[in-house]
Amino acid sequence: MALRDIHLLGSPALRARCAEIATVDDELRRLIDDLFETMDAAKGVGLAANQVGITRRVAVVGVEDDRFVMINPVITSAEGRVRAEEGCLSIPEVYGEVTRPERIVLEALDREGKPFRRELEGYLARAAQHEIDHLDGIIFLDHLSLLKRELLLRRWKKEHRGGELVRKVTPERDSRG
Ligand code: NI
């Protein structure tokens, strides 16, 4: 297992529509292990492959003890609406309130390539939706009003004067999403 560098806002990988995964093999499982390790080191609750520069449809989610990988994830139903604060490991120090469905049904493949279906709610549902957005090249700022988005982008530019497109993850870094 290895820590991967996390791509930051401005990296084209974050705007890619990621490719479906045809084969679940050992190489993919190594990527999944790295995603979990990198998410944990960065103290995130989710991480999508394109956030480490791999534009394939796989992401991990981990909220407290509930941790899972989703390969080729699809949301087959969604209901309710709830607003809550989100952040993103690719946009450190920037947080915004995002409205999303409260409950979803998720279908995906697990790390053995077997299909599974889960009903998710609460923060887990939010984290899964945030990560599936990533696989479609969408970031949480895209859900905000233009005014709010521009405000947060200005904050990001101020926080992020170096302008680098990737960051090294070290266990003491503290961030989210
Ligand atoms: Ni994110």
Image (spheres, rainbow, N blue to C red):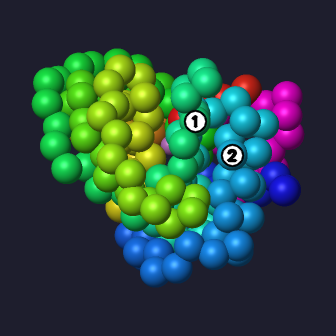
Label 1 CB sits under 8 Å from any ligand 1 atom: no
In the image, residue 167 lies in the stretch drawn in magenta: yes
Nearest to viewer (mark 2 / mark 1): 1
The answer as to whether callout 2 falls within 8 Å of ligand 1 is no
Q: Which image quadrant is residue 124 in?
A: top left
Q: CA distance from mark 2 to mark 1?
A: 9 Å
Q: Amino acid at mark 1?
A: Arg
In the rendered image, residue 36, in percent from the top left (x then y), is placed at 69, 46
Residue 158 sits inside the magenta stretch: no
Q: Is residue 14 left or right of residue 38?
A: left
The part of the chain drawn in magenta is 159-173
Give the residue at x 54% y 42%.
Answer: 68
Indicate which disc residue 67 carries: 1
Name the residue rendered at 56%, 73% in the picture. Answer: 24
Among the 4 quarters of the image, the one containing residue 17: bottom left
* Amino acid type, residue under disc 2 in the picture: Phe
Tell me if I can see residue 50 in this picture. no
Task: Please say if 38 is above or below 112.
Answer: above
Q: Is residue 55 above or below residue 111?
A: below
Instruction: Please rate how many residues cluster around mark 2, counting C-alpha atoms within 10 Å: few if below 14, some from 14 to 19, many from 20.
Output: many
For the question of whether residue 79 can be seen, the reply is yes
Give me the disc on residue 36: 2
Asked if the residue at tag 1 contacts the one at tag 2, i.e. Cβ–Cβ closer than 8 Å, the answer is: yes
**10 Å crowding of disc 1: few (<14), some (14-19), many (20+):** few
Q: Secondary structure at mark 2?
A: helix
Front residue (pair 45, 67): 67
Give the residue furthest to the bottom: 22
Which residue is found at the position 39% from the left and 59% from the top?
115
- Magenta-colored segment: predominant secondary structure: loop
